[in-house]
Image (spheres, grey):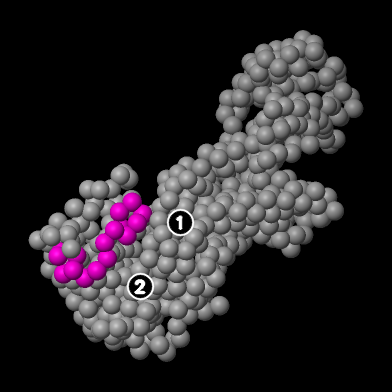
Amino acid sequence: MEREKVITAKGLTKRFGDFTAVDAISFEVGKGEIFGFLGANGAGKTTAIRMLCGLSIPTDGEATVAGFDVYRQTEQIKRNIGYMSQKFSLYNDLTVRENIRFFAGIYGKSHQFIKENTERLLDRLHLQAESNKQVKSLPLGWKQKLAFSVAIFHEPDIVFLDEPTGGVDPVTRREFWNMIYEAAESGITVFVTTHYMDEAEYCNRVSIMVDGRIDALGTPQDLKQQFKAESMDNVFLKLARKATRGE
Amino acid sequence: MKQFLSFVRKEFYHIFRDARTMLILLGMPVAQIIIFGFALTNEVKNSRIAVLDMSKDAATASLITELEASRYFEVEKRLHTYKEVEEEFKLGNIKMAVVLPQNFGADLLHFNTAQVQLIADASDPNVANTLTNYASAIIQDYQNRITDGRRLPYTIKTELRMLYNPQMEGAYSFVPGVMAMVLLLVCTMMTAITIVREKEMGTMEVLLVSPIQPIKIIVAKAVPYLLLSMVNIASILLLSVFLLDVPINGSLVLLVLESILFTVTSLVLGLFISTITDSQQVAMFISLTGLFMPTVMLSGFMFPIENMPRVLQLISNIVPAKWYYIIVRSVMIKGVGLEAVWKETLVLFGMMVFFLIMSIRKFKIRLA
């Protein structure tokens, strides 16, 4: 199945002084794909994501995100992506509605758009009763689901999820992944990092970073065959052991 | 603009929902002005004084008894020469000296008028002021009593002499001082903390990934504090004028404009602190030790700068509050115009520009 490419990277590199955090990585991600971006801590994932989000200018190589260049068009990139980080990304002292309104507001969405879509979102998450409560009173799982919904509220082409399910129970993780599938089906490309290897199995394709390079790239099925491993867990361990870089 | 307004609204939610923030922002200025205001007029009890009685007659004896009988004074020493007065002050034994010149009683009887000199240690102006007021009142009482029933009134002229700080500068010093302290605390510490909190919570990343420009984030963060500072300036001035009877002798417009300049300087300082720290505790620590303490100690508000060692006098020049304090005191108490404070204004403006450039450079480095 040939998809339209929404992320392309060719020889993308980031150096900090003598240290090469990201070493000439190349990959492509298609529209509506769920792309797993794996790697041990310190492998360079965060730096790579920062470059793709327009937060950090690459030292070398080329990349486009949503059709925009990561060197010159960071503003347009920011407008067309959503982002949810491993740290919690909603404001605890704001209510559910205020959080939605704030984030939609900084993406420049119209009042009308915010009003209509807020109700739809609250219905879908069954959060109508809690909509005027401060976010801190919600259980972690709900917060996480809400954070994801807020991250795609402005209808971006791509959403970057940086370890979105840290500290969440398995049932909620499952529900969270159902939301990811829904988003992907609606055409949003999902770029996700995770430490849970069972989640890697849910991805359409995964890449594994070791010491700043992408050492493996393919569907979970392919990778397991290629590395003669039972599960993604074993694939990951085989690769991560080669790492020479510490944290 | 819409992005910006969404952001400002969010900042107000943060402020209004946090009881502690609200208390610091709006309660503290009022509390401080009242505390300092009443500290100024606080009663002074059993202060040690010295008496130089060069007349030694019935009138001086009864006047000294009157002073001693009051609960305010304790006659520590009887002096014999004028020179001793200075020595006693230098040793720090006394807070005030009462000098009764030769022929006090005779003058009072024959010419109906006599003189008393009150010498006070004005290095602590508030105390000096209180003491001389009390002493004058006691002398006045005495005078009224002996005048009673006579046709020609006796008048005792009290002459006041303030040692070490003859202009009594600092009498109303607490109002400008509190304004400097409050604005600095509200603007610098709160701005630093609110920006660093976003970093700590991880929301800063989300904001940076969004299309809102970093400069808008920073300005939106500062706007609520700027507005609340205006409220504080207004409440401090109202309290000063109506509760503490401190006059505004100069131009109110100039005073407000200078306050806005100082507020912006403080905001920029807060921004600078936020760019060099990553945790709220550190930001608070830097604000308190690096700014709040020097403001209290070195702005001239608690302790006159002229009395400090040379080194501290030099250091005091880099404390922004010192300049603001001079400006407010000049405009508010002395009633002078911009022509008298343009140098201080320029210094403050220079500091603001300097820290602004520093923070923008720092901020850009972080982003790269």
Residue at the image point whose x is 25% and y is 48% from the top: A242
Range drawn in magenta? A209-225
Q: Is residue A216 left or right of residue B231?
A: left
Q: Secondary structure at mark 2?
A: strand
Q: How many residues crowd mark 2 within 10 Å: few (<14), some (14–19), many (20+)?
A: some
Dot 1 amino acid type? Lys
Q: Residue furthest right?
A: B111
Decide: marks 1, 2 in contact (CB < 8 A)?
no
Dot 2 amino acid type? Glu
Q: Is residue A49 visible?
A: yes
Q: Is residue B344 above or below residue A202?
A: above
The mark found on residue A14 in the picture is 1
The residue at which mark 2 appears reads as: A28
Residue A8 position by quadrant: bottom left
State yes or no: residue A215 in magenta: yes
Residue at the image point whose x is 45% and y is 83% from the top: A109
Q: Position of residue A14 (x, y in %)?
A: 45, 56
Marked residue chain, label 2: A
Q: Considering depth in this image, is A154 or A141 the residue closer to the camera?
A: A154
Rounded to the nearest whole Å, what is the CA distance between mark 1 and mark 2?
18 Å
Q: Position of residue B272 (x, y in %)?
A: 57, 51
